[in-house]
Amino acid sequence: MKSFLRLAAIAATAFTQPAFAQLSKPEAKMAATIDAEYERSVALLEKLVNQNSGTMNFEGVRAVADMMRAELEPLGFRLQWIDMAKAGRAGHLVASKAGKKGTKKLLLIAHLDTVFEADSPFQKFVRKGEEAEGPGAGDDKGGMVVIVAALRAMQAAGTLKDANIEIHMTGDEEDAGDPIDVARAPLIAAGKVADVALDFEGLSIEDGKDMGVIARRSSNSWKLEVRGVTGHSSLIFDDTYGDGAAFELARIIHRFRTELPEQNLTFNVGLMTAGQEAGIDSDGIRASAKGKTNIIPGVALARGDFRTLSEEQSARVRGKMEAIVGASAPRTSAKISFDPGSYPAMAPTGGNKALLAKLNGVNRDLGLGEQLPLDPLKRGAGDISFVANDVDGLVGLGTYSRGDHAPGETVDLASIKRQAKRAAILMTRLSREKAP
């Protein structure tokens, strides 16, 4: 009778707990390690968050890099600090380890910096049960903690030694250095020799379900300058004075609104000014103007952005905008320029979809739900886009959080476990595949 009760209890336990029947012994070991080290992971997150690393706090960014160095070196990684003074930023931390020859090389992407600078009043990690508030708690210090938790689990299970991995933790994801081709040169080079890119920014959730991210839209900035003939307002629209700069700016913006819309495109005018005199500061965030109601504006300026799902779409939109700007009204001229520091797009390629299918294989074996592709309109630009043309990738392997980029940013601490298990098992399986 006692034996029967014992067997019944075991059966009940098996029924109520997730079944990991499809996990190998090393994979089950990884999942158990991540659960056992949960509080260690939370303690690491608290340490990282309590060190301010606003993009322009170079000392703070380097301090967080040193904390990550202390986590990764014991795992067998070789660490390199790449100074970015030439791009006006602190720099990047790169960690690499060689594994079994002939197998896929994995590129992991995260970032050291946050939007909260040293003078922000929001500075401390505050735990509230299974949640915690703090600057960068989700974006992206939570992502870095997931990386460490996953790698430690792989080491405990004996799967890390054979994995070819390079980790790029940029120091300026929130405010990229200038020129951007210099600031992102190390990451771009890494993408050209990698076989898979995994981005550890935050997990996306919709209607309570974890989503997969296989695409990110671009971020392109533009500047518009319009010139007209200034004079007394009673003469506007005649053959000598024409339409004036303000009406010409309005014509251009109206045509943008009516002629540009297409699927997966958004565009915005963030700043405008016009007058007898007008200007925008060097930071592009403050406008000034001087004029009177009876003077035709001689200058009008605007700044804005547009976001696309592919580089082909970006080129097409730029062409449309240039054509609209070039159709000048009488006695006016206009020119539009595009910021060379724009973020490219990450298109939803077949390779990215195949990677998501592999992640969903991990989900099934963990007893987790399928992650459907997130609508790319709901995800902004990110560092993985700089390698998207060279390597297949996934985004959103970091923690789930809400209120990012604002005081009160809150991370779901329990998501560390879920995401680290997914990452550890996915990386182990990918690392056993032959390189192309």
Image: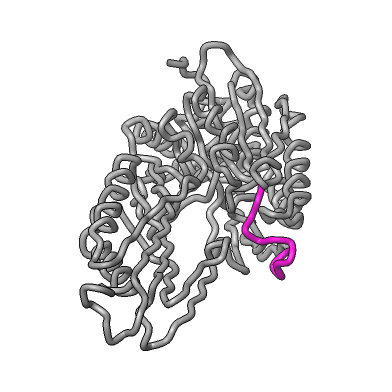
Q: Out of 108 and 46, give the one closest to the viewer.
A: 108
The residue under the point 65% across, 37% down is 33
The residue under the point 35% across, 46% down is 372
Q: Where is residue 425 in the image (x, y as percent from the top left)?
A: 53, 32
Tell which residue pokes out farthest to the top in this image.
101
**Quadrant hosting residue 261:** bottom left
**Prevalent SS, magenta region:** loop
> In which quadrant will I find the N terminus?
top right
Q: Out of 281 and 343, give the one closest to the viewer.
A: 281
Report if residue 145 is visible in the image.
Answer: no
Q: Does residue 79 lie above or below 91 as drawn? A: above
**Quadrant hosting residue 56:** bottom right
The residue under the point 76% across, 54% down is 51
Q: Where is residue 41 in the image (x, y as percent from the top left)?
A: 69, 46
Q: Where is residue 323 in the image (x, y as percent from the top left)?
A: 25, 53
Residue stretch rendered in magenta on the structure: 112-123
| Residue 92 shown left or right of residue 259 in the figure | right
Q: Does residue 34 lie above or below 317 as drawn? A: above
Color theme of the render: one colour
Report if residue 295 is visible in the image.
Answer: yes
Q: Does the magenta stretch include residue 115?
A: yes
Q: Does the magenta stretch include residue 283?
A: no
Q: Does residue 161 lie above or below 101 as drawn? A: below
